[in-house]
């Protein structure tokens, strides 16, 4: 399995998020150590992360490389980073792109999803919602997936699938040809908590640590 992980030094909303200790390791190492049987590529703008990866013998399988100057910045798309990675290392096999901010994502889950590329050009982690949605318009609120005049059980309503960004798995040509990680024949892979959790705010950090303490 080829795993690609972009890791920034600075975090906009959670200070030093990737370096905070989680289950006895810095958050980024907590993730990297799950995939010691795979080829893992880390794209980073951090001298500290680059140095630590290369000095940690446990991460023998991790290929860390410094992000090119023109690709540094909060407004740079992850798709631009992936395209650069594909061309830099001439990647031909499916890529599993993950984030270190999904600390409960299991190795076996990612492998199960990766195997879906045998019949799909891309696999997207998602959260399924089957509840009553409303949309706000200038004239007020309107129902999205239900008829207020006809009460239905929520399990009978159309389901909505939210990309939760825990992982995207795709063939390299999907991204090169479309600029997107989702191809024409995607498989939406459902995740539940805590695997679906992503650390984006301080409240998210508190939540994942509370869950960890209860394990």
Image (cartoon, helix red, strand yellow):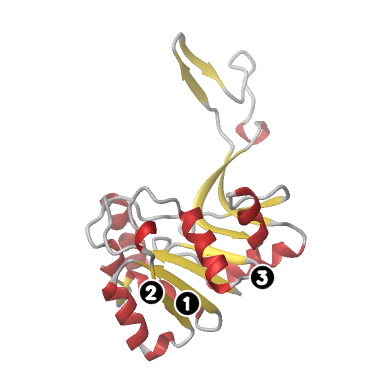
Q: Which residue is mark 3?
A: 93
Q: Which residue is mark 1?
A: 34
Q: Nearer the viewer, residue 86 or 116?
A: 86
> Farthest right residue?
119
Q: Nearer the viewer, residue 178 or 25?
A: 178
> Farthest front residue?
70
Please tell me which of labels 3 and 2 falls first in the chain: 2
Mark 3 closeness class: few <14, some 14–19, many ≥20 residues within 10 Å? some
Q: Quadrant of residue 72?
A: bottom left
Residue 103 in view, yes or no: no
Q: Which residue is mark 2?
A: 30
> Farthest top residue?
139
- The residue sitting at 33% across, 69% down in the picture is 27
Q: Quadrant of residue 140?
A: top left
Residue 163 in the image, given as x and y percentages of width and height = 53, 47
Residue 44 in the image, given as x and y percentages of width and height = 37, 68
């Amino acid at each position: 399995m080829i795993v690609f992980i972009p890791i920034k030094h600075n975090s906009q909303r959670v200070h030093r998020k990737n370096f905070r200790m989680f289950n006895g390791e810095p958050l980024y190492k907590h993730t990297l150590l799950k995939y010691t049987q795979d080829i893992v590529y880390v794209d980073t703008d951090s001298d500290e992360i680059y140095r630590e990866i290369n000095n940690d013998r446990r991460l023998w399988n991790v290929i860390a490389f410094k992000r090119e100057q023109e690709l540094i910045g909060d407004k740079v798309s992850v798709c631009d980073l992936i395209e650069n990675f594909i061309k830099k290392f001439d990647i031909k096999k499916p890529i599993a792109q993950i984030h270190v901010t999904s600390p409960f994502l299991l190795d076996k889950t990612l492998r199960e999803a990766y195997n879906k590329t045998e019949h799909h050009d891309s696999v997207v982690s998602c959260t399924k919602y089957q509840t009553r949605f409303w949309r706000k318009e200038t004239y007020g609120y309107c129902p999205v997936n239900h008829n207020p005049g006809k009460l239905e059980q929520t399990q009978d309503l159309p389901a909505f699938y939210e990309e939760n960004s825990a992982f995207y798995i795709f063939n390299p040509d999907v991204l090169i040809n479309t600029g997107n990680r989702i191809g024409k024949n995607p498989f939406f892979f459902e995740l539940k908590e805590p695997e679906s959790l992503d650390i984006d705010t301080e409240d998210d950090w508190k939540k994942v640590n509370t869950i960890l303490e209860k394990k």
